[in-house]
Image (cartoon, grey):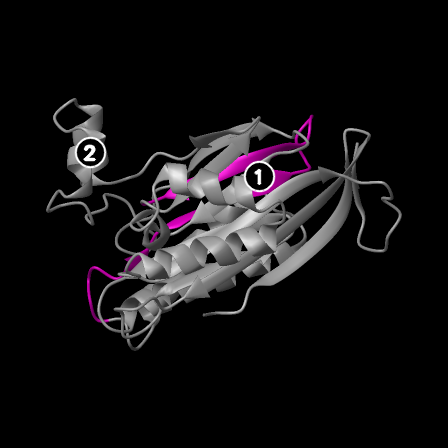
Amino acid sequence: MAETTTTTRSVTVAQRHLLLSWAGVTDQGRRRDNNQDAFLADYPLFVVADGMGGHAGGEIASQSTVTRLQGVVTDGAVTRPAIEHALERAVADIADHPETTDEGTGTTLTGVFLDLEAEQPQWVSLNIGDSRVYLLRDDRLVQVTTDHSVVQELIAAGKLSPEEAEGHPYSNVITRAVGASELTPPDYLTIDVQQGDRFVICSDGLTKELTDYGIQHFLREHAEPGPAVDAMLAAALENGGRDNVTLIIVQVDGADDSSSPDSDTAE
């Protein structure tokens, strides 16, 4: 099983000292020949990309997207315009890559970033495709993002139930992606910063194998991000591992000391 990495960082948000901790992992799964997923977990941006298109195309798309977003973090200003500019450059990278031959080459993209430039610091979720962000708050798990998929459109139109969607022949068909066509900006949602929150950011390789209840169960069973990530990945593989599996857990805790060299302040 792939190795999980765990990181912590002290921050001060609206005069509150908080400790952010996160862990992320990606695994090929049990039935795929290669891993077309990629992820970025680098404060303050946490994203998962699930590539598609040809043997190498999906990997090219997801890695190109994550690489461009890493540049946004390195430049130090993670904002919606900066993210969208990076995605435009990723689309060009994908199109120009010598191994990109499939017109369907592209990638999902979903995640959260801590927006420190807003009047009040807040989390912002972003989403293109059917990878997902979940939030566990006050012991209640909610899906923050809405899938861009054919079955989700059918569910929204009342033509399909969520239970029927699981086995639908178009369950893997998404309606938006990075690289498959002209870029459409991500959907965004702002979320207040609250101590105790836990985000799960994942590709559909996890949600194919674990129900929402299963995700909530492992969060309840494991108080720290690393063990929770390991437990969810192990369960997804045990349940079949039909696709690449990628997930990040981001956790917000109270911090006793925000004076470490890695501290960040947002007043």
At a point 66% along the width and 39% down the height, the residue shown is 252
Mark 2: few, some, or many residues within 10 Å (few <14, many ≥20)? few
Q: In this picture, which residue range is highlighted in magenta?
A: 101-129
Counting every numbered tag in the picture gives: 2
Q: Residue furthest bottom?
A: 98
At a point 32% along the width and 73% down the height, the residue shown is 34
Residue ID for mark 2: 163
Q: Earlier in the sequence, mark 1 or mark 2?
A: 2
Residue 209 at what x, y percent from top left? 31, 51
Residue ID for mark 1: 198
At a point 53% along the width and 69% down the height, the residue shown is 3
Q: Nearer the viewer, residue 180 or 149?
A: 149
The residue type indicated by label 2 comes to Glu
Above or below: residue 128 compared with residue 86: above
Above or below: residue 54 compared with residue 89: below
Relative placement, left or right, of 101 versus 114 is: left
Relative placement, left or right, of 21 versus 3 is: right
Residue 14 at what x, y percent from top left? 77, 29
Q: Quadrant of the N terminus?
A: bottom left
Q: Nearer the viewer, residue 48 or 141?
A: 141
> Is 127 one of the magenta-colored residues?
yes
Residue at mark 1 to residue at mark 2: CA–CA distance: 26 Å
